[in-house]
Image (tube, grey):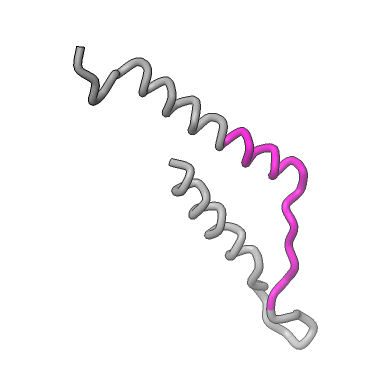
Amino acid sequence: MNALLISRYEYIIGGQLVPLFKGSWAPALLSYAPSPTEWLLLLVAIFLSNAVNAFGEVTLRLGREG
């Protein structure tokens, strides 16, 4: 789940680096840095994916005998 989250994050960030309007005034790639709110949302998403995974492991007991 974390790998899927990272791949989607890279997809979104890559889409924001390319300018929509290409003119002589626009650089080839724009600079982008995530805001503190976006970093916090990323940490919350990673925490929630790990919490859901841990809850499923404890509740479902898949692969255990007994």
Q: Left or right: where does residue 43 sit relative to residue 33?
A: left
Q: Is residue 28 or residue 46 the one in the foreground?
A: 46
Can you give x and y, in whole percent of width and height, for residue 36 in the image?
77, 43
User: What residue lies at 76% left-to-right and 48% top-to-bottom?
Assistant: 35
Q: Left or right: where does residue 24 sit relative to residue 61?
A: right
Q: Is residue 7 or residue 19 the one in the foreground?
A: 7
Can you give x and y, in whole percent of width and height, for residue 51 in the image?
49, 25
Q: Left or right: where does residue 14 sit relative to residue 22?
A: left
Residue 57 belongs to the span the image colors magenta: no
Residue 31 belongs to the span the image colors magenta: yes
Rendered image quadrant of residue 62: top left
Q: Answer above or below: position of 22 versus 40.
A: below
Magenta range is 29-45
User: What residue lies at 56% left-to-right and 36% top-to-bottom?
Assistant: 45
User: What residue lies at 59% left-to-right and 65% top-to-bottom?
Assistant: 14
Quadrant (top left/top right/bottom left/bottom right) for the N terminus:
top left
